[in-house]
Amino acid sequence: MHKVRLESVRRKSGGRIHLTPKVPQTGPVTTLCGQTLADGSYAAVQDEPDCTNCIRRAKDPARISGAFFAQEEGSELLRLSLEQAQSRKPNLRVISGHGAEREKPVDWPAPKPPPEVIPDRLGELVTRGFKPSGEGVWRSPQGVIVKMRKHVRPRSDGKDWRFAEMVFEGSIVATRLEDGIRIRAGDVEVNATDDGVEVQLKKK
Protein backbone atom coordinates (compact mmCIF):
# COMPACT_ATOMS: atom_id res chain seq x y z
CA MET A 1 0.00 0.00 0.00
CA HIS A 2 1.40 3.40 -1.02
CA LYS A 3 1.45 5.98 1.73
CA VAL A 4 1.54 9.74 1.30
CA ARG A 5 4.97 10.98 2.37
CA LEU A 6 5.04 14.15 4.43
CA GLU A 7 8.17 16.18 5.06
CA SER A 8 9.39 17.73 8.31
CA VAL A 9 10.11 21.44 8.58
CA ARG A 10 11.20 23.74 11.42
CA ARG A 11 11.91 27.42 11.89
CA LYS A 12 15.58 28.30 11.72
CA SER A 13 15.17 30.02 15.06
CA GLY A 14 14.09 26.72 16.62
CA GLY A 15 10.78 25.49 17.99
CA ARG A 16 8.43 22.68 17.04
CA ILE A 17 9.02 20.38 14.09
CA HIS A 18 6.00 20.53 11.77
CA LEU A 19 4.73 18.48 8.85
CA THR A 20 4.02 19.71 5.32
CA PRO A 21 3.39 17.95 2.00
CA LYS A 22 6.64 19.29 0.52
CA VAL A 23 9.28 21.74 1.71
CA PRO A 24 9.81 24.16 -1.22
CA GLN A 25 13.22 25.53 -2.15
CA THR A 26 11.87 29.07 -2.11
CA GLY A 27 8.74 30.82 -1.00
CA PRO A 28 6.55 30.39 2.08
CA VAL A 29 5.41 27.00 3.36
CA THR A 30 2.17 26.06 5.12
CA THR A 31 2.22 23.35 7.78
CA LEU A 32 -0.56 20.84 8.51
CA CYS A 33 -1.41 22.72 11.69
CA GLY A 34 -2.16 25.85 9.62
CA GLN A 35 0.96 27.94 10.28
CA THR A 36 2.60 29.79 7.37
CA LEU A 37 6.38 30.07 7.58
CA ALA A 38 7.86 32.97 5.60
CA ASP A 39 10.46 32.47 2.88
CA GLY A 40 13.92 31.99 4.35
CA SER A 41 12.66 31.48 7.92
CA TYR A 42 12.51 27.68 7.81
CA ALA A 43 14.54 24.66 6.85
CA ALA A 44 13.79 21.02 6.03
CA VAL A 45 14.85 18.55 8.74
CA GLN A 46 15.03 14.77 8.99
CA ASP A 47 13.84 14.59 12.60
CA GLU A 48 10.46 13.23 13.64
CA PRO A 49 7.71 15.86 14.07
CA ASP A 50 6.73 16.92 17.60
CA CYS A 51 3.88 19.30 16.75
CA THR A 52 0.78 17.70 18.28
CA ASN A 53 -1.63 19.28 15.79
CA CYS A 54 0.44 18.22 12.78
CA ILE A 55 0.69 14.65 14.06
CA ARG A 56 -3.06 14.48 14.69
CA ARG A 57 -3.98 15.96 11.30
CA ALA A 58 -1.56 13.62 9.53
CA LYS A 59 -4.05 10.84 10.31
CA ASP A 60 -6.88 12.70 8.56
CA PRO A 61 -6.93 11.97 4.78
CA ALA A 62 -9.09 15.04 4.11
CA ARG A 63 -6.56 17.34 5.81
CA ILE A 64 -3.69 15.81 3.85
CA SER A 65 -5.52 16.13 0.53
CA GLY A 66 -6.32 19.78 1.22
CA ALA A 67 -2.70 20.51 2.12
CA PHE A 68 -1.40 18.89 -1.08
CA PHE A 69 -3.73 20.86 -3.31
CA ALA A 70 -3.01 24.08 -1.39
CA GLN A 71 0.68 23.69 -2.29
CA GLU A 72 -0.20 22.69 -5.87
CA GLU A 73 1.03 19.17 -5.14
CA GLY A 74 -2.27 17.61 -6.14
CA SER A 75 -0.68 15.78 -9.10
CA GLU A 76 1.54 13.84 -6.68
CA LEU A 77 -1.48 12.84 -4.63
CA LEU A 78 -3.36 11.69 -7.74
CA ARG A 79 -0.36 9.63 -8.85
CA LEU A 80 -0.19 7.83 -5.51
CA SER A 81 -3.94 7.19 -5.55
CA LEU A 82 -3.71 5.71 -9.07
CA GLU A 83 -0.84 3.41 -8.08
CA GLN A 84 -2.76 2.27 -5.02
CA ALA A 85 -5.87 1.52 -7.10
CA GLN A 86 -3.86 -0.49 -9.65
CA SER A 87 -2.13 -2.56 -6.96
CA ARG A 88 -5.35 -3.33 -5.13
CA LYS A 89 -6.73 -6.74 -6.05
CA PRO A 90 -10.47 -7.06 -6.51
CA ASN A 91 -12.22 -9.04 -3.82
CA LEU A 92 -14.18 -11.61 -5.79
CA ARG A 93 -16.15 -14.42 -4.22
CA VAL A 94 -17.87 -17.30 -5.94
CA ILE A 95 -21.27 -17.94 -4.44
CA SER A 96 -22.55 -21.38 -5.24
CA GLY A 97 -26.21 -21.91 -5.95
CA HIS A 98 -28.52 -23.70 -3.60
CA GLY A 99 -28.53 -26.72 -5.88
CA ALA A 100 -24.79 -27.23 -5.43
CA GLU A 101 -25.08 -27.57 -1.69
CA ARG A 102 -26.00 -30.92 -0.27
CA GLU A 103 -28.94 -30.82 2.01
CA LYS A 104 -27.94 -31.33 5.61
CA PRO A 105 -29.93 -33.90 7.56
CA VAL A 106 -32.32 -32.42 10.05
CA ASP A 107 -31.81 -33.54 13.63
CA TRP A 108 -35.34 -34.18 14.82
CA PRO A 109 -35.83 -34.55 18.57
CA ALA A 110 -36.38 -38.06 19.80
CA PRO A 111 -40.08 -38.86 20.15
CA LYS A 112 -41.31 -38.75 23.70
CA PRO A 113 -43.26 -41.71 25.00
CA PRO A 114 -46.94 -41.01 25.54
CA PRO A 115 -47.87 -40.11 29.12
CA GLU A 116 -48.86 -43.04 31.27
CA VAL A 117 -52.60 -43.47 31.33
CA ILE A 118 -53.92 -43.98 34.86
CA PRO A 119 -57.07 -46.09 35.00
CA ASP A 120 -60.06 -44.83 36.98
CA ARG A 121 -59.90 -47.88 39.21
CA LEU A 122 -57.08 -50.21 40.16
CA GLY A 123 -58.65 -53.18 41.90
CA GLU A 124 -59.98 -51.94 45.24
CA LEU A 125 -58.51 -48.44 44.75
CA VAL A 126 -60.41 -45.59 43.11
CA THR A 127 -57.43 -43.71 41.66
CA ARG A 128 -59.16 -40.35 41.14
CA GLY A 129 -57.08 -37.72 42.98
CA PHE A 130 -54.21 -40.10 43.82
CA LYS A 131 -50.71 -39.87 42.34
CA PRO A 132 -48.60 -42.98 41.71
CA SER A 133 -45.44 -43.13 43.83
CA GLY A 134 -44.05 -46.49 42.78
CA GLU A 135 -45.14 -50.04 42.11
CA GLY A 136 -48.46 -50.42 43.91
CA VAL A 137 -47.91 -47.24 45.99
CA TRP A 138 -50.24 -44.25 45.75
CA ARG A 139 -50.22 -40.87 47.51
CA SER A 140 -53.21 -38.64 48.25
CA PRO A 141 -53.12 -34.80 48.14
CA GLN A 142 -52.78 -34.70 51.98
CA GLY A 143 -49.92 -37.19 52.00
CA VAL A 144 -51.73 -40.42 52.85
CA ILE A 145 -49.80 -43.38 51.44
CA VAL A 146 -51.85 -46.33 50.24
CA LYS A 147 -50.11 -49.59 49.39
CA MET A 148 -51.79 -52.11 47.12
CA ARG A 149 -50.81 -55.75 46.59
CA LYS A 150 -51.35 -57.59 43.34
CA HIS A 151 -52.74 -61.13 43.42
CA VAL A 152 -50.57 -63.82 41.90
CA ARG A 153 -53.60 -65.40 40.25
CA PRO A 154 -55.82 -63.04 38.23
CA ARG A 155 -59.33 -62.69 39.68
CA SER A 156 -62.38 -63.19 37.56
CA ASP A 157 -63.84 -59.85 38.68
CA GLY A 158 -60.78 -57.92 37.54
CA LYS A 159 -59.77 -56.85 41.05
CA ASP A 160 -56.20 -58.09 40.85
CA TRP A 161 -54.98 -55.31 43.15
CA ARG A 162 -56.08 -55.56 46.79
CA PHE A 163 -55.69 -53.02 49.58
CA ALA A 164 -52.67 -53.93 51.76
CA GLU A 165 -51.65 -50.99 53.95
CA MET A 166 -52.31 -47.31 54.67
CA VAL A 167 -49.74 -44.98 56.27
CA PHE A 168 -50.53 -41.51 57.60
CA GLU A 169 -48.76 -39.35 60.18
CA GLY A 170 -51.99 -37.70 61.33
CA SER A 171 -55.01 -39.08 63.15
CA ILE A 172 -56.85 -42.16 61.91
CA VAL A 173 -60.54 -42.70 62.72
CA ALA A 174 -62.21 -46.12 62.51
CA THR A 175 -66.03 -46.28 62.62
CA ARG A 176 -68.15 -49.44 62.89
CA LEU A 177 -71.05 -49.52 60.47
CA GLU A 178 -73.87 -52.03 59.93
CA ASP A 179 -72.03 -53.65 57.04
CA GLY A 180 -68.50 -53.40 58.39
CA ILE A 181 -65.90 -50.81 59.43
CA ARG A 182 -65.00 -47.51 57.78
CA ILE A 183 -61.47 -46.14 58.29
CA ARG A 184 -60.60 -42.51 57.63
CA ALA A 185 -57.06 -41.14 57.50
CA GLY A 186 -56.56 -37.58 56.31
CA ASP A 187 -58.42 -37.27 53.02
CA VAL A 188 -58.65 -41.04 52.40
CA GLU A 189 -61.37 -43.44 53.53
CA VAL A 190 -61.56 -47.21 53.37
CA ASN A 191 -65.07 -48.70 53.23
CA ALA A 192 -66.06 -52.33 53.50
CA THR A 193 -67.77 -54.00 50.53
CA ASP A 194 -69.36 -57.40 49.99
CA ASP A 195 -66.13 -58.93 48.69
CA GLY A 196 -63.47 -56.73 50.29
CA VAL A 197 -62.92 -52.98 50.65
CA GLU A 198 -62.93 -49.84 48.55
CA VAL A 199 -60.25 -47.16 48.98
CA GLN A 200 -60.95 -43.64 47.74
CA LEU A 201 -60.67 -39.97 48.60
CA LYS A 202 -63.29 -38.69 51.01
CA LYS A 203 -66.33 -37.30 49.29
CA LYS A 204 -66.83 -33.59 49.91
Image (cartoon, rainbow, N blue to C red):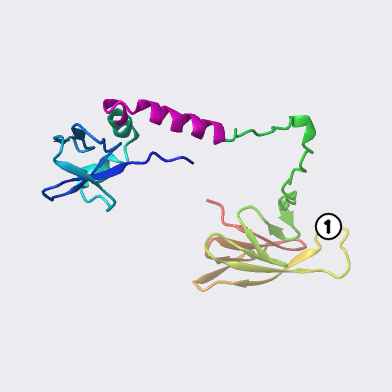
Q: Is residue 83 magenta?
A: yes
Residue 103 position by quadrant: top right
Query: Is residue 92 found left or right of 17 in the rendered image?
Result: right
Which residue occupies 30% across, 43% down?
7
Mark 1 surroundings: few (<14), some (14-19) or many (≥20) residues within 10 A: few
Is residue 29 placed above or below 50 in the rendered structure? above
Helix, strand or loop at mark 1: loop
Q: Nearer the viewer, residue 55 or 19?
A: 19
Q: Is residue 126 visible?
A: yes
- The x and y percentages for residue 10 are 19, 46
Query: Is residue 185 found left or right of 65 in the rendered image?
Result: right
Which residue occupies 86% across, 70% down?
152
* Residue pointed to by mark 1: 158
Q: Is residue 132 magenta?
A: no
Q: Is residue 178 visible?
A: no
Residue 149 position by quadrant: bottom right
Is residue 26 placed above or below 42 in the rendered structure? above
Residue 75 position by quadrant: top left
- The x and y percentages for residue 104 are 76, 42
Q: Which residues are magenta?
A: 68-87
Residue type for callout 1: Gly
Characterize the magenta stretch by its predominant secondary structure: helix
Is residue 1 placed above or below 200 in the rendered structure? above
Which residue occupies 69% across, 32% down?
95
Q: Nearer the viewer, residue 91 or 38?
A: 38
Is residue 2 placed above or below 128 in the rendered structure? above
Which residue occupies 13% across, 40% down?
41
- The x and y percentages for residue 168 are 55, 71
